Image (tube, coloured by chain):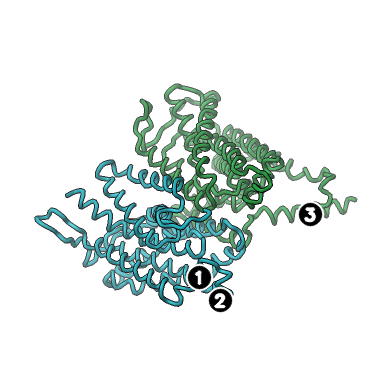
Amino acid sequence: MENKGKRSPIRIVLPVLCILVLIVVPVIFRNPAFLQLMVLVLLYAYLTSSWNLVGGFAGVLPLGHTLFAGVGAYTSTLLFIELGLTPWIGMFVGALLAMVAGILIGLPTLKLRGAYFALSSIAFLEGMRVVTENTKVAFGVKINGPQGLLLPLKGNSLYYFQFDNKIWYYYIILIMTAIVLYITYKVSVSRLGYYLMAGGEDKEAAEALGVNVFRCKMIAMMMSTFLTAFGGTFYAQLVRYIYPRGIMNLEFAFEIAFIAIVGGRGTIAGPILGSFLLVPVAELTRIYLGGSYLGIHLAMYGLVLMLVMIFQPRGITEPLTKIYNNILDRFEGVRS
Amino acid sequence: MYLLEALITGVTMGSIYGLTALGLTLIFGVMKVINFAHGSFLMVAMFVTYWLIKLTGIDPYISLFVVVPVLFFLGFLTQRFLISPAFKGEKDVREPISVILLTSGLWIFLDAMALLLFGAFYRTVKTSHSGKTFVFGDGDLIINKTRLYGLIIALITSLILWFFLKKTRTGRAIRAVGQDRDAARLMGIDSDFIYDFTFGLGIALVGIAGVVLMPFYYVHPTVGVVFDIRAFIIVVLGGLGSIPGALIGGIIIGVVESVGAQFITATWTEGLIYLIFLLVLFFKPSGLFGYKQEW
């Protein structure tokens, strides 16, 4: 990393190439199953990157993050059904509500340490799921308990966030992922990012240096919950059916955390790498083996997580970055 | 009378919850590690018991002598070859997060493997004890025998564990390592072995719970989750690391659940338990019997 100052043009080759490939890929490969898989991969990449803001940088372990996706999905869907409001506005209302929920949950829990925070995040998710499952009607609004809500079909309409061709969902989630990555990058090089890293590593030392660790964690939590809710609305529009066990699902929340951790918590590329490696494998095993071998994709998640924790506790991004940098250095060595 | 019956059901079921929490609290007290795979080990214990009874027709309570050693070695080996490498990697970290992750990976892995091997069926086993009851008065008060045995076994187990930790040499070594592992090592205690042993012991305790549950409960690949989340709550309620706390916390949760179901819809009682957990976490995170620490 000696030549970090002078950025040679070769360093932007890979990122630009990746972006180009991602833009072009759905136009070339028109197979709907492939497109569906890519949308799913990007949705996971989006959700894990949002999770990463608090789970990676703030050094806490949220294991119930789908709660906020649920708030987003339910808010935009209910506004859509009851008032006919476009999900494009509804998703912002949902995100604001999720952020309020994030603040209310963060106030008592962000002070807790390691395992306690993880446990309380599970309790909040499960508690919220129980409440939703037991509510048929709230304030005159039909919640439908465990049956959940079906989104009314409006046909191909940008205004209603509904498209016949999955390609639109692909580009929307691609843009969303790009935005969340940009935010993550900005945070990681900002003062907030450094404070978060310091606070996550050693809270007392950071506080002794005058960092308000709690406040930094709270800001990270607010950003993360806000962005996660968008993912929930996207999911609702994509699947057009939401129910408590589907979206506020503990296993789903675990998957998000696992993917980010296997990829590398607190790195920008980690959640993306994790999603692109794990989600296709999980989906393909679920599709091709899931019928005769129930639960095989979850077994794979568990196994991969254990192996990574034993052999590469910081995630797979770190060694890959090292190799990548070595190759680049060699290129630059040849050139100069 | 309904209320009394609900109370008794709550106490008996709660004592079994307490039994599952006992291992969790022991492992935490010594290693400062929360074993997220605890419920999955309960599921494993129940499957071992299930197949043992199914294939050999053995009395469920005799199967204790097989299930408990099997689970002990399972726990011992898990700690030695799986957890201890990650655990040593962050010896000086105050929040050992990678161990939480490792055990949650194990949790998902074990549950999914059980699903793969045994399918998503709810299995029950009929034993000579199943369905037997004690009847008082003219059928005013009916107590399920197998649940009562559960309560008795839970109490005996807690007593033996307490006695073992207080009075025996190994028990004292375990407590010494829990208090200060470096000092304990300087006193000549093999702390690595103590960790392996403690983890094995904690899993053996959950093995007892599995055997006790099998005569009247069902086994299913994700049955552990029901008990896992309750065990976490009980351990926090009773105080992490406290043995009487685990048992009493378990009974409190059991009673809240069964008596609560008399007044509100059963599906809501689950929410009630989470509420209690969050209240304890925010107002008294050290729990009822836990000593004050910086968690």
- Chain of the residue under label 1: B
* SS state under label 3: helix
Q: Which mark is residue A133?
A: none
Q: Is residue A65 left or right of residue A327?
A: left
Can see residue B257? yes
In percent of the image, x 21 and y 48: which residue is there? B3
Q: Earlier in the sequence, mark 2 or mark 1?
A: 1
Q: Which mark is residue A327?
A: 3
Q: Is disc 2 surrounded by few (<14), some (14 to 19) or many (20+) residues within 10 Å?
A: few
Tell me if I can see residue A24 in this picture.
Answer: no
Residue at position x 33%, y 42% in the image: B268
Does residue B180 appear to the left or right of B246 in the view shown? right
Number of the front mark, 3 or 1: 1
* Chain A, hue in figure: green
Chain under numbered label 3: A
Q: Say left or right for B51 vs B91.
A: left
Residue under pointer 2: B187
Chain B display color: cyan
| Label 1: how many Cα within 10 Å (few below 14, some 14–19, many 20+) | many
The reply to the same-chain question for discs 3 and 1 is no
Residue tagged 1? B176
Q: Amino acid at mark 2?
A: Met
Q: Quadrant of residue B211?
A: bottom left
Are the residues under badges 3 and 2 in a single subunit? Answer: no
